[in-house]
Image (tube, helix red, strand yellow):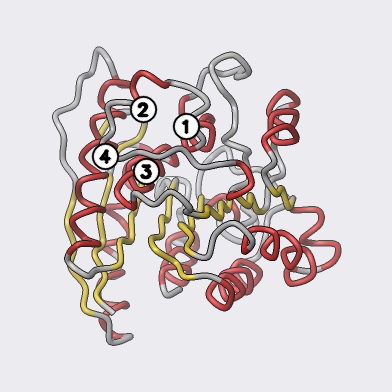
Amino acid sequence: MSVQIIQVPYDSGHRGIRLGKGPLRFVDQGIARMLRGRRHRVDVECLEVETDLMNPIKTVFEVNRLLAKQVKFALESGKFPLVLAGNCNNCVGTIAGLHQADLGVIWFDAHGDFNTPETSYSGYLDGMALALATGDCWQGLLDTIPDFIPIAGNHIVHIGGRALDPKESARFSSAGISLVDSKSLQAIGIHQSLEAAFLNLSHHADKVYVHIDMDIVDPVVARSKSFAPTGGLTVEQVVEALQMIKENFSIRAGTIAACDPDSDREGRAIKAGLTFAQF
């Protein structure tokens, strides 16, 4: 398989800081070499935009516009797009680049990322990433991203949530998203927990985009960021879930997002991400 690694080293519109360091570290730690060792043909590119320090949200959407073009070009070149992202909101550019009306989304994340400006207590844009993917907020700026098609709720499975806001939980209930939380995964196992959600998704989509926020892994196992909540999955449990996805769907693109190397002092989160990239 030919793989196009696309580094997006931005966090909240700023390059190479905090979570924006993660995409750079993955490449420094040999993600391309690892994939080549598995007999994949691998190209690496690093996305660069002119940042606007006075208006970081403008930069966020400029990043997504360029990412959409890069993902589209990768697909047209017969390559699998593997996006290494600082922020989860880069899902928007990836989804736009895929430009598929019946696309499914499988989202691994400790947080819901399903707030809107009206429900968010923090105003943190990346806490709205999945809501952006469904077209529920920032509509004017979403319209500037070429070929973006909002994802319907019944085309989404959210895996591993354990830190959802009250209003966010209500939004999940009304949106029709399959929500498989961390407690369920721990209590009855990966396969049994995900089987029904994946069966339901298969009725709507056979091609999926897989998005992994690295805080899906419990920080005791591998700390990906300072605000990663406890109660997450092991690396082996995530791998088991990814194997199920491979068996049931065609994966069109993947993202590994939101890893801050400054919090990952022993390199265990980066190592976990390298493991997930093999799927």
Q: Position of residue 102 (x, y in %)?
A: 48, 53
Residue 132 marker: 1
> In terms of image quadrants, where is residue 228?
top right
Identify residue for label 2: 142
Q: Is residue 88 above or below residue 218?
A: above
Q: Position of residue 23 (x, y in %)?
A: 31, 52
Which quarter of the image is occupied by the C terminus? bottom left
Question: Quick check: 196 left or right of 67?
Answer: right
Task: Indicate which disc, 1 or 3, sits on the residue closer to the N terminus.
Answer: 3
The residue positioned 37% from the left and 38% from the top of the image is 18
Amino acid type at circle 3 is: Gly
The residue positioned 47% from the left and 53% from the top of the image is 264
- Mark 3 or mark 2: which is in front? 2
Q: Is residue 71 above or below residue 146?
A: below
Residue 48 marker: none
The residue positioned 31% from the left and 78% from the top of the image is 34
Task: Verify CB contact (< 8 Å) between mark 2 and mark 1.
Answer: yes
Task: Indicate which disc, 3 or 2, sits on the residue closer to the N terminus.
Answer: 3
Looking at the rendered structure, the secondary structure element under dot 2 is helix
Identify residue for label 4: 16
Task: Verify CB contact (< 8 Å) between mark 1 and mark 3.
Answer: no
Amino acid type at circle 1 is: Leu
Task: Indicate which disc, 1 or 4, sits on the residue closer to the N terminus.
Answer: 4
Rounded to the nearest angstrom, the CA distance separating label 3 from label 2 is 19 Å
- Mark 3 or mark 4: which is in front? 3
Amino acid type at circle 2 is: Leu
Task: Indicate which disc, 2 or 4, sits on the residue closer to the N terminus.
Answer: 4
Rounded to the nearest angstrom, the CA distance separating label 2 from label 4 is 24 Å
Rounded to the nearest angstrom, the CA distance separating label 1 from label 4 is 23 Å
Identify residue for label 3: 86
